[in-house]
Image: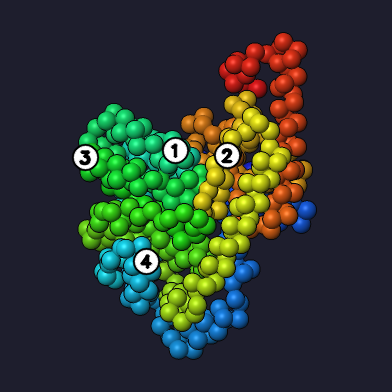
Amino acid sequence: MAEAGLIQFDEWVDLYAERVETMRTSAVRDLFAAASRSDIISLSGGMPDVRRLPLDTVGEVAAHAILQEGIAGLQYGESPGRTQTKEVICRLMKDFDVLITPEDVTVTTGAQQALDLLAKTFINPGDAIITEGPTYLGALQAFSAYQPTIHTIAFDDDGMRTDLLEKCLATLGPRKAKFIYTIPTFQNPGGVTMSLKRRTRLLELAHAYQVPVIEDDPYGRLRFEGEPVSCLRALDEEVIYLGTVSKVFAPGLRTGWVIAPHPILQKLNMVKQGSDLCGSALCQVIVEHYFNETPWRDVLSDMCGKYRERRDAMLAALDEFFPPEAHWTHPTGGFFVWVTLPPYVDTTQMLSIALEAGVTFVPGDGCYPAASGKGHNAMRIAFCYEEPEKLREAVQRLSLVIEERLELYRAFINAGMLRPERLSEEGI
Ligand SMILES: Cc1ncc(COP(=O)(O)O)c(C=O)c1O
Protein backbone atom coordinates (compact mmCIF):
# COMPACT_ATOMS: atom_id res chain seq x y z
CA MET A 1 0.00 0.00 0.00
CA ALA A 2 1.32 3.44 -0.89
CA GLU A 3 1.57 5.82 2.01
CA ALA A 4 -0.53 8.94 1.61
CA GLY A 5 1.56 11.86 0.45
CA LEU A 6 4.37 9.74 -1.03
CA ILE A 7 4.91 9.82 -4.78
CA GLN A 8 4.47 6.29 -6.11
CA PHE A 9 6.22 4.95 -9.24
CA ASP A 10 3.52 4.40 -11.86
CA GLU A 11 4.00 0.83 -13.04
CA TRP A 12 0.86 1.00 -15.22
CA VAL A 13 2.06 3.89 -17.36
CA ASP A 14 2.30 1.88 -20.60
CA LEU A 15 -1.24 0.56 -20.18
CA TYR A 16 -3.12 3.84 -20.16
CA ALA A 17 -5.17 4.91 -23.19
CA GLU A 18 -3.74 7.60 -25.46
CA ARG A 19 -6.57 9.95 -24.56
CA VAL A 20 -5.28 10.18 -21.00
CA GLU A 21 -1.96 11.47 -22.35
CA THR A 22 -3.69 14.41 -23.99
CA MET A 23 -5.66 15.31 -20.87
CA ARG A 24 -4.38 17.65 -18.23
CA THR A 25 -5.49 18.03 -14.64
CA SER A 26 -7.32 21.18 -13.77
CA ALA A 27 -4.92 23.70 -12.24
CA VAL A 28 -7.84 24.92 -10.13
CA ARG A 29 -8.62 21.48 -8.71
CA ASP A 30 -4.94 20.92 -7.97
CA LEU A 31 -4.89 24.22 -6.16
CA PHE A 32 -7.85 23.50 -3.94
CA ALA A 33 -5.67 21.59 -1.48
CA ALA A 34 -3.17 24.43 -1.16
CA ALA A 35 -5.88 27.07 -1.12
CA SER A 36 -7.45 25.54 1.98
CA ARG A 37 -4.54 26.88 4.08
CA SER A 38 -6.08 29.56 6.26
CA ASP A 39 -3.48 32.23 5.41
CA ILE A 40 -4.12 31.95 1.69
CA ILE A 41 -6.72 34.07 -0.07
CA SER A 42 -8.05 32.20 -3.06
CA LEU A 43 -8.84 34.00 -6.28
CA SER A 44 -8.79 30.73 -8.16
CA GLY A 45 -12.08 28.85 -7.72
CA GLY A 46 -15.38 29.80 -9.36
CA MET A 47 -17.29 28.84 -6.24
CA PRO A 48 -20.73 30.29 -5.64
CA ASP A 49 -21.13 31.70 -2.13
CA VAL A 50 -23.32 28.92 -0.75
CA ARG A 51 -22.65 30.35 2.75
CA ARG A 52 -25.39 32.85 1.88
CA LEU A 53 -28.03 30.19 1.21
CA PRO A 54 -30.73 30.03 3.90
CA LEU A 55 -29.63 26.68 5.28
CA ASP A 56 -32.74 26.23 7.42
CA THR A 57 -34.92 26.61 4.31
CA VAL A 58 -32.71 24.28 2.29
CA GLY A 59 -32.82 21.79 5.17
CA GLU A 60 -36.62 21.94 5.23
CA VAL A 61 -36.74 21.50 1.47
CA ALA A 62 -34.46 18.47 1.64
CA ALA A 63 -36.45 16.91 4.51
CA HIS A 64 -39.68 17.63 2.71
CA ALA A 65 -38.32 16.12 -0.49
CA ILE A 66 -37.31 12.92 1.27
CA LEU A 67 -40.43 12.61 3.40
CA GLN A 68 -42.82 13.38 0.56
CA GLU A 69 -41.05 11.62 -2.28
CA GLY A 70 -38.47 9.53 -0.52
CA ILE A 71 -39.03 6.33 -2.43
CA ALA A 72 -38.78 8.07 -5.82
CA GLY A 73 -35.71 9.99 -4.70
CA LEU A 74 -34.00 6.85 -3.44
CA GLN A 75 -34.69 4.74 -6.53
CA TYR A 76 -33.04 4.73 -9.99
CA GLY A 77 -34.65 7.36 -12.16
CA GLU A 78 -35.17 7.89 -15.88
CA SER A 79 -31.94 8.51 -17.83
CA PRO A 80 -33.07 11.87 -19.26
CA GLY A 81 -34.17 13.02 -15.80
CA ARG A 82 -37.41 13.32 -13.81
CA THR A 83 -40.32 14.92 -15.68
CA GLN A 84 -41.02 17.14 -12.64
CA THR A 85 -37.43 18.44 -12.75
CA LYS A 86 -37.74 19.12 -16.46
CA GLU A 87 -40.96 21.03 -15.79
CA VAL A 88 -39.06 23.26 -13.37
CA ILE A 89 -36.35 23.75 -16.00
CA CYS A 90 -38.98 24.71 -18.61
CA ARG A 91 -40.29 27.38 -16.22
CA LEU A 92 -36.77 28.67 -15.52
CA MET A 93 -36.06 28.90 -19.25
CA LYS A 94 -39.22 30.94 -19.82
CA ASP A 95 -37.42 33.80 -18.03
CA PHE A 96 -35.00 33.76 -20.98
CA ASP A 97 -37.80 33.65 -23.59
CA VAL A 98 -36.99 30.03 -24.35
CA LEU A 99 -40.30 28.22 -24.65
CA ILE A 100 -39.81 24.47 -24.38
CA THR A 101 -41.51 21.33 -23.10
CA PRO A 102 -39.97 18.54 -20.99
CA GLU A 103 -39.26 16.45 -24.13
CA ASP A 104 -36.75 19.11 -25.20
CA VAL A 105 -34.62 18.62 -22.07
CA THR A 106 -32.19 16.08 -20.61
CA VAL A 107 -31.15 16.53 -16.98
CA THR A 108 -27.43 15.95 -16.47
CA THR A 109 -25.04 15.59 -13.56
CA GLY A 110 -24.05 19.24 -13.71
CA ALA A 111 -23.36 21.07 -16.95
CA GLN A 112 -19.97 19.39 -16.77
CA GLN A 113 -21.49 16.03 -17.63
CA ALA A 114 -23.30 17.62 -20.55
CA LEU A 115 -19.93 18.78 -21.91
CA ASP A 116 -18.55 15.26 -21.65
CA LEU A 117 -21.65 13.67 -23.23
CA LEU A 118 -21.62 16.14 -26.11
CA ALA A 119 -17.94 15.56 -26.71
CA LYS A 120 -18.46 11.79 -26.62
CA THR A 121 -21.38 12.12 -29.03
CA PHE A 122 -19.70 14.39 -31.59
CA ILE A 123 -15.90 14.06 -31.52
CA ASN A 124 -13.69 11.52 -33.26
CA PRO A 125 -9.92 11.83 -32.75
CA GLY A 126 -8.58 14.65 -34.92
CA ASP A 127 -11.97 16.31 -35.51
CA ALA A 128 -12.01 20.10 -35.51
CA ILE A 129 -13.97 21.93 -32.84
CA ILE A 130 -14.06 25.66 -32.15
CA THR A 131 -14.05 27.38 -28.77
CA GLU A 132 -13.35 30.83 -27.45
CA GLY A 133 -9.72 31.29 -26.47
CA PRO A 134 -9.37 31.50 -23.53
CA THR A 135 -12.23 29.26 -22.49
CA TYR A 136 -13.56 27.25 -19.54
CA LEU A 137 -10.84 24.85 -18.52
CA GLY A 138 -13.35 22.16 -17.52
CA ALA A 139 -14.65 22.20 -21.09
CA LEU A 140 -11.12 21.75 -22.40
CA GLN A 141 -10.70 18.80 -20.04
CA ALA A 142 -13.96 17.23 -21.18
CA PHE A 143 -13.28 17.79 -24.90
CA SER A 144 -9.61 16.83 -24.95
CA ALA A 145 -10.40 13.30 -23.72
CA TYR A 146 -11.83 12.69 -27.21
CA GLN A 147 -8.68 14.06 -28.93
CA PRO A 148 -10.06 16.84 -31.12
CA THR A 149 -8.09 19.59 -32.81
CA ILE A 150 -9.26 22.68 -30.93
CA HIS A 151 -9.33 25.99 -32.80
CA THR A 152 -9.56 28.97 -30.46
CA ILE A 153 -11.14 32.32 -31.32
CA ALA A 154 -10.13 35.40 -29.34
CA PHE A 155 -12.69 37.66 -27.68
CA ASP A 156 -12.79 41.38 -26.95
CA ASP A 157 -15.21 43.40 -24.80
CA ASP A 158 -18.07 42.37 -27.14
CA GLY A 159 -17.38 38.66 -26.79
CA MET A 160 -16.10 36.18 -29.38
CA ARG A 161 -14.60 37.94 -32.43
CA THR A 162 -16.91 36.80 -35.19
CA ASP A 163 -14.53 38.16 -37.86
CA LEU A 164 -11.95 35.64 -36.64
CA LEU A 165 -14.60 32.95 -36.37
CA GLU A 166 -15.52 33.55 -40.01
CA LYS A 167 -11.88 33.19 -41.07
CA CYS A 168 -11.56 29.96 -39.12
CA LEU A 169 -14.76 28.50 -40.58
CA ALA A 170 -13.75 29.56 -44.09
CA THR A 171 -10.39 27.82 -43.70
CA LEU A 172 -11.97 24.63 -42.38
CA GLY A 173 -14.82 24.64 -44.91
CA PRO A 174 -18.54 23.83 -44.57
CA ARG A 175 -19.60 21.11 -42.11
CA LYS A 176 -16.00 20.48 -41.14
CA ALA A 177 -16.04 21.63 -37.50
CA LYS A 178 -18.07 19.39 -35.21
CA PHE A 179 -19.29 22.29 -33.09
CA ILE A 180 -18.70 25.83 -31.91
CA TYR A 181 -18.62 25.99 -28.10
CA THR A 182 -19.29 29.39 -26.56
CA ILE A 183 -20.02 30.93 -23.16
CA PRO A 184 -21.61 34.13 -24.48
CA THR A 185 -22.73 35.63 -21.17
CA PHE A 186 -20.20 36.57 -18.45
CA GLN A 187 -17.67 34.28 -20.05
CA ASN A 188 -15.42 31.99 -18.04
CA PRO A 189 -12.60 33.03 -17.74
CA GLY A 190 -13.03 36.38 -19.54
CA GLY A 191 -16.04 37.89 -17.77
CA VAL A 192 -17.07 39.47 -21.10
CA THR A 193 -20.53 39.26 -22.68
CA MET A 194 -21.18 38.82 -26.40
CA SER A 195 -23.16 41.68 -27.95
CA LEU A 196 -26.46 40.97 -29.69
CA LYS A 197 -24.89 41.89 -33.03
CA ARG A 198 -22.15 39.31 -32.56
CA ARG A 199 -24.68 36.70 -31.39
CA THR A 200 -26.68 37.21 -34.56
CA ARG A 201 -23.54 37.01 -36.68
CA LEU A 202 -22.33 33.86 -34.93
CA LEU A 203 -25.66 32.17 -35.67
CA GLU A 204 -25.55 33.30 -39.32
CA LEU A 205 -22.07 31.85 -39.69
CA ALA A 206 -23.03 28.62 -37.93
CA HIS A 207 -25.88 28.16 -40.40
CA ALA A 208 -23.78 29.14 -43.41
CA TYR A 209 -21.08 26.61 -42.47
CA GLN A 210 -23.54 24.06 -41.03
CA VAL A 211 -21.88 23.79 -37.65
CA PRO A 212 -23.88 23.17 -34.44
CA VAL A 213 -23.54 25.76 -31.68
CA ILE A 214 -23.23 24.81 -28.00
CA GLU A 215 -24.18 27.66 -25.67
CA ASP A 216 -22.94 27.15 -22.10
CA ASP A 217 -24.81 29.50 -19.77
CA PRO A 218 -24.11 28.96 -16.06
CA TYR A 219 -23.82 32.68 -15.26
CA GLY A 220 -26.72 34.21 -17.25
CA ARG A 221 -28.74 35.11 -14.15
CA LEU A 222 -25.80 36.75 -12.35
CA ARG A 223 -26.08 40.21 -13.90
CA PHE A 224 -25.04 43.25 -11.83
CA GLU A 225 -25.81 46.01 -14.31
CA GLY A 226 -27.04 46.71 -17.83
CA GLU A 227 -29.81 45.07 -19.83
CA PRO A 228 -29.89 41.31 -20.41
CA VAL A 229 -28.88 40.16 -23.90
CA SER A 230 -30.97 37.42 -25.50
CA CYS A 231 -29.45 33.97 -25.08
CA LEU A 232 -28.49 32.22 -28.33
CA ARG A 233 -31.13 29.52 -27.80
CA ALA A 234 -33.85 32.20 -27.69
CA LEU A 235 -32.61 33.43 -31.08
CA ASP A 236 -32.27 30.02 -32.69
CA GLU A 237 -34.00 26.74 -31.80
CA GLU A 238 -31.15 24.66 -33.19
CA VAL A 239 -28.70 25.89 -30.56
CA ILE A 240 -27.68 23.29 -27.98
CA TYR A 241 -28.12 25.03 -24.64
CA LEU A 242 -26.48 24.01 -21.34
CA GLY A 243 -27.87 25.21 -18.01
CA THR A 244 -27.11 24.39 -14.38
CA VAL A 245 -28.33 25.11 -10.86
CA SER A 246 -24.72 25.30 -9.66
CA LYS A 247 -24.31 29.08 -9.66
CA VAL A 248 -27.91 29.99 -8.81
CA PHE A 249 -28.48 27.40 -6.09
CA ALA A 250 -25.90 24.76 -5.16
CA PRO A 251 -23.17 22.95 -7.13
CA GLY A 252 -23.28 20.15 -4.54
CA LEU A 253 -26.56 18.99 -6.05
CA ARG A 254 -24.84 18.38 -9.41
CA THR A 255 -27.89 19.22 -11.46
CA GLY A 256 -27.58 20.68 -14.94
CA TRP A 257 -29.41 20.27 -18.23
CA VAL A 258 -29.17 20.18 -22.00
CA ILE A 259 -31.78 21.57 -24.39
CA ALA A 260 -31.20 20.32 -27.93
CA PRO A 261 -32.97 19.26 -31.13
CA HIS A 262 -34.57 15.84 -30.57
CA PRO A 263 -32.21 13.72 -32.72
CA ILE A 264 -29.24 15.05 -30.74
CA LEU A 265 -31.03 14.51 -27.40
CA GLN A 266 -31.77 10.91 -28.35
CA LYS A 267 -28.07 10.25 -28.94
CA LEU A 268 -27.12 12.06 -25.72
CA ASN A 269 -29.60 10.01 -23.69
CA MET A 270 -28.14 6.81 -25.08
CA VAL A 271 -24.60 7.98 -24.27
CA LYS A 272 -25.73 9.02 -20.80
CA GLN A 273 -27.03 5.54 -20.04
CA GLY A 274 -23.52 4.17 -20.55
CA SER A 275 -22.13 6.92 -18.42
CA ASP A 276 -24.26 6.89 -15.26
CA LEU A 277 -27.61 5.17 -16.04
CA CYS A 278 -29.33 8.20 -14.56
CA GLY A 279 -28.53 11.26 -12.47
CA SER A 280 -29.32 11.44 -8.76
CA ALA A 281 -33.10 11.40 -8.38
CA LEU A 282 -32.75 12.67 -4.82
CA CYS A 283 -30.86 15.77 -5.93
CA GLN A 284 -33.45 16.39 -8.62
CA VAL A 285 -36.29 16.17 -6.08
CA ILE A 286 -34.51 18.70 -3.85
CA VAL A 287 -34.00 21.01 -6.84
CA GLU A 288 -37.71 20.76 -7.73
CA HIS A 289 -38.82 21.64 -4.21
CA TYR A 290 -36.32 24.50 -3.92
CA PHE A 291 -37.45 26.21 -7.12
CA ASN A 292 -41.15 25.42 -6.59
CA GLU A 293 -41.51 26.29 -2.93
CA THR A 294 -38.96 28.83 -1.77
CA PRO A 295 -38.35 32.53 -2.52
CA TRP A 296 -35.19 31.58 -4.48
CA ARG A 297 -35.30 34.77 -6.57
CA ASP A 298 -34.86 36.88 -3.41
CA VAL A 299 -31.94 34.71 -2.27
CA LEU A 300 -30.31 35.03 -5.69
CA SER A 301 -30.84 38.76 -5.82
CA ASP A 302 -29.19 39.08 -2.37
CA MET A 303 -26.24 36.99 -3.63
CA CYS A 304 -25.93 39.04 -6.81
CA GLY A 305 -25.77 42.18 -4.64
CA LYS A 306 -22.84 40.63 -2.79
CA TYR A 307 -21.11 39.53 -6.00
CA ARG A 308 -21.48 43.05 -7.32
CA GLU A 309 -19.85 44.53 -4.20
CA ARG A 310 -17.00 42.06 -4.60
CA ARG A 311 -16.61 42.81 -8.31
CA ASP A 312 -16.45 46.52 -7.45
CA ALA A 313 -13.87 45.87 -4.73
CA MET A 314 -11.71 43.81 -7.07
CA LEU A 315 -11.82 46.33 -9.92
CA ALA A 316 -11.02 49.18 -7.49
CA ALA A 317 -8.07 47.21 -6.06
CA LEU A 318 -6.77 46.44 -9.56
CA ASP A 319 -6.90 50.16 -10.37
CA GLU A 320 -5.14 50.97 -7.13
CA PHE A 321 -2.40 48.33 -7.07
CA PHE A 322 -1.75 46.77 -10.48
CA PRO A 323 1.05 48.16 -12.66
CA PRO A 324 0.26 50.21 -15.78
CA GLU A 325 1.52 47.34 -17.96
CA ALA A 326 -1.45 45.17 -16.88
CA HIS A 327 -4.89 45.16 -18.55
CA TRP A 328 -8.07 43.52 -17.39
CA THR A 329 -11.71 42.98 -18.35
CA HIS A 330 -14.65 44.77 -16.67
CA PRO A 331 -17.40 42.17 -16.18
CA THR A 332 -21.01 43.27 -15.72
CA GLY A 333 -21.90 39.94 -14.10
CA GLY A 334 -20.60 36.46 -13.37
CA PHE A 335 -17.53 35.57 -11.32
CA PHE A 336 -14.32 36.41 -13.18
CA VAL A 337 -11.84 39.03 -14.31
CA TRP A 338 -9.22 38.16 -16.94
CA VAL A 339 -5.90 39.95 -16.50
CA THR A 340 -3.29 40.25 -19.25
CA LEU A 341 0.32 41.04 -18.32
CA PRO A 342 3.27 41.85 -20.59
CA PRO A 343 4.35 38.89 -22.77
CA TYR A 344 7.54 38.26 -20.81
CA VAL A 345 5.65 37.36 -17.61
CA ASP A 346 4.84 33.67 -17.15
CA THR A 347 1.93 33.30 -14.75
CA THR A 348 2.41 29.54 -14.27
CA GLN A 349 5.94 30.19 -13.03
CA MET A 350 4.58 33.01 -10.90
CA LEU A 351 1.99 30.83 -9.16
CA SER A 352 4.30 29.22 -6.61
CA ILE A 353 5.65 32.63 -5.60
CA ALA A 354 2.09 33.92 -5.32
CA LEU A 355 1.23 30.95 -3.11
CA GLU A 356 4.12 31.87 -0.82
CA ALA A 357 2.75 35.41 -0.77
CA GLY A 358 -0.64 33.95 0.27
CA VAL A 359 -2.76 34.29 -2.87
CA THR A 360 -3.86 31.94 -5.67
CA PHE A 361 -5.19 32.49 -9.19
CA VAL A 362 -5.66 30.42 -12.33
CA PRO A 363 -2.72 30.71 -14.75
CA GLY A 364 -3.95 31.70 -18.21
CA ASP A 365 -2.37 28.87 -20.18
CA GLY A 366 -4.75 26.39 -18.51
CA CYS A 367 -7.60 28.15 -20.29
CA TYR A 368 -6.16 27.29 -23.72
CA PRO A 369 -5.64 23.88 -25.31
CA ALA A 370 -2.42 22.19 -24.13
CA ALA A 371 0.70 23.14 -26.09
CA SER A 372 -1.04 26.06 -27.81
CA GLY A 373 1.59 28.36 -26.29
CA LYS A 374 -1.13 30.90 -25.50
CA GLY A 375 -2.22 32.52 -22.28
CA HIS A 376 1.10 32.18 -20.44
CA ASN A 377 1.04 35.91 -19.59
CA ALA A 378 -2.58 36.02 -18.42
CA MET A 379 -4.53 34.93 -15.35
CA ARG A 380 -8.09 34.43 -14.23
CA ILE A 381 -9.01 35.95 -10.90
CA ALA A 382 -12.37 35.26 -9.28
CA PHE A 383 -14.24 37.74 -7.10
CA CYS A 384 -17.19 35.50 -6.19
CA TYR A 385 -16.15 34.04 -2.86
CA GLU A 386 -14.06 36.39 -0.76
CA GLU A 387 -15.27 39.51 1.07
CA PRO A 388 -14.22 42.93 -0.33
CA GLU A 389 -11.44 43.55 2.24
CA LYS A 390 -9.89 40.17 1.51
CA LEU A 391 -10.11 40.75 -2.23
CA ARG A 392 -8.29 44.05 -1.80
CA GLU A 393 -5.62 42.34 0.28
CA ALA A 394 -5.28 39.52 -2.29
CA VAL A 395 -4.94 41.92 -5.22
CA GLN A 396 -2.33 43.91 -3.28
CA ARG A 397 -0.35 40.72 -2.52
CA LEU A 398 -0.56 39.70 -6.17
CA SER A 399 0.53 43.12 -7.35
CA LEU A 400 3.70 42.84 -5.24
CA VAL A 401 4.53 39.50 -6.86
CA ILE A 402 3.95 40.94 -10.33
CA GLU A 403 5.84 44.14 -9.56
CA GLU A 404 8.86 42.13 -8.42
CA ARG A 405 8.96 40.34 -11.77
CA LEU A 406 8.47 43.50 -13.77
CA GLU A 407 11.30 45.17 -11.82
CA LEU A 408 13.62 42.40 -12.91
CA TYR A 409 12.86 42.96 -16.58
CA ARG A 410 13.02 46.73 -16.24
CA ALA A 411 16.49 46.32 -14.71
CA PHE A 412 17.59 44.20 -17.69
CA ILE A 413 16.23 46.80 -20.07
CA ASN A 414 17.85 49.71 -18.23
CA ALA A 415 21.18 47.90 -18.20
CA GLY A 416 20.86 47.60 -21.98
CA MET A 417 20.91 43.81 -21.70
CA LEU A 418 17.53 43.47 -23.37
CA ARG A 419 15.52 45.39 -25.91
CA PRO A 420 11.90 45.63 -24.75
CA GLU A 421 10.56 44.40 -28.10
CA ARG A 422 12.75 41.28 -27.85
CA LEU A 423 11.67 40.26 -24.38
CA SER A 424 9.03 37.77 -25.41
CA GLU A 425 11.27 36.30 -28.14
CA GLU A 426 14.07 35.69 -25.67
CA GLY A 427 11.63 33.73 -23.58
CA ILE A 428 12.43 35.13 -20.16
C1 LIG B 1 -18.62 27.76 -18.20
C2 LIG B 1 -18.91 26.63 -17.28
N1 LIG B 1 -19.52 25.55 -17.76
C3 LIG B 1 -19.81 24.49 -16.99
C4 LIG B 1 -19.46 24.49 -15.65
C5 LIG B 1 -19.77 23.27 -14.83
O1 LIG B 1 -20.90 23.50 -14.07
P1 LIG B 1 -21.62 22.38 -13.23
O2 LIG B 1 -21.32 22.66 -11.80
O3 LIG B 1 -23.07 22.53 -13.55
O4 LIG B 1 -21.10 21.06 -13.66
C6 LIG B 1 -18.82 25.59 -15.10
C7 LIG B 1 -18.40 25.59 -13.70
O5 LIG B 1 -17.71 26.43 -13.21
C8 LIG B 1 -18.54 26.70 -15.94
O6 LIG B 1 -17.94 27.80 -15.48
CA separation in Å, label 4 and label 1:
27 Å
What is the three-letter code of the residue carrying label 1? Phe
Q: Residues within 10 Å of mark 1 (few under 14, many from 20)?
A: many
- Residue 175 located left or right of residue 9: left
Q: Which residue is mark 4?
A: 95
Residue to which mark 1 is pinned: 155
Q: CA distance from mark 1 to mark 3?
A: 21 Å
Asked if 313 appears above or below 168 in the picture, the reply is below
The label shown at residue 298 is none
Q: Name the residue rendered at 58%, 57% in the picture.
A: 308
Q: Is mark 1 within 8 Å of ligand 1?
A: no
- Report the mark closest to the observer, 3 or 2: 2
In the rendered structure, which disc, 1 or 3, sits on the residue that comes first in sequence? 1
From the image, tell me which residue sits under label 2: 328
Q: Mark 2 and mark 1: span between their CA atoms?
A: 13 Å
Question: What label sits on residue 208 in the rendered view?
Answer: 3
User: In terms of secondary structure, where does tag 2 sit?
Assistant: strand
Which amino acid lies under the numbered mark 3 shown in the image of this protein?
A: Ala
Q: Secondary structure at mark 4?
A: loop
Q: Amino acid at mark 2?
A: Trp
Residue at the spot 49% in from the left edge and 57% down from the top edge? 223
Q: Are marks 3 and 2 in contact (CB under 8 Å)?
A: no
Q: CA distance from mark 3 to mark 2?
A: 34 Å
Q: Earlier in the sequence, mark 3 or mark 4?
A: 4
Q: Quadrant of the N terminus?
A: bottom right
Asked if disc 3 is less than 8 Å from ligand 1, the answer is no
